[in-house]
Image (tube, rainbow, N blue to C red):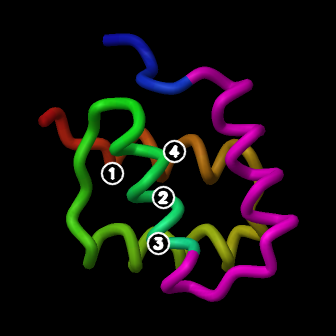
Amino acid sequence: MGEKFSVAEVAALRNELLQGGLDSFQTAELLKMFLAGRGYGVSPENALDAAGRIECANCNVESLHKELESLALVM
């Protein structure tokens, strides 16, 4: 099974996260919007948990990509 998101998509999201100065709740909302815009769902709790892990990983592209791939639920 291939990846759901391209490196370019993830890198663009990462840049948005870094420039936004967002807190964990705002980051979780952005993750939910990113996934919904691509036809995937995510639970609010999982998005918030992922936001915390992304912040701890300094929002590097590999960690963000891994989080997105594990969060995305087919609608």
Q: Which residue is mark 4?
A: 66
- C-alpha gap between disc 2 and disc 1: 9 Å
**Can you identify the residue that label 2 sits on?**
31
Instruction: Give the magenta range.
Output: 6-26
| Residue on which the image places disc 3 | 28
Dot 3 and dot 2 residues touching (CB under 8 Å):
yes
Write down the quadrant of residue 50 in the picture: bottom left
Residue that numbered label 1 is attached to: 71
Residue 3 spot, x, y in % from top left: 45, 20
Task: Give how far apart the Cα atoms at labels 1 and 3 are.
Answer: 11 Å
* Residue 34 in picture, x, y percent from top left: 48, 46
Label 1 with label 3: CB-CB less than 8 Å: no
Residue 29 is drawn in which quadrant? bottom left
Dividing the picture into quarters, in which one does residue 32 lie?
A: bottom left
Question: Which residue, as the protein is rendered here, is positioned at the far left?
Answer: 75
Q: Amino acid at mark 4?
A: Lys
* Dominant secondary structure (helix, strand or loop) of the stretch shown in magenta: helix
**Quadrant that contains the N terminus:** top left
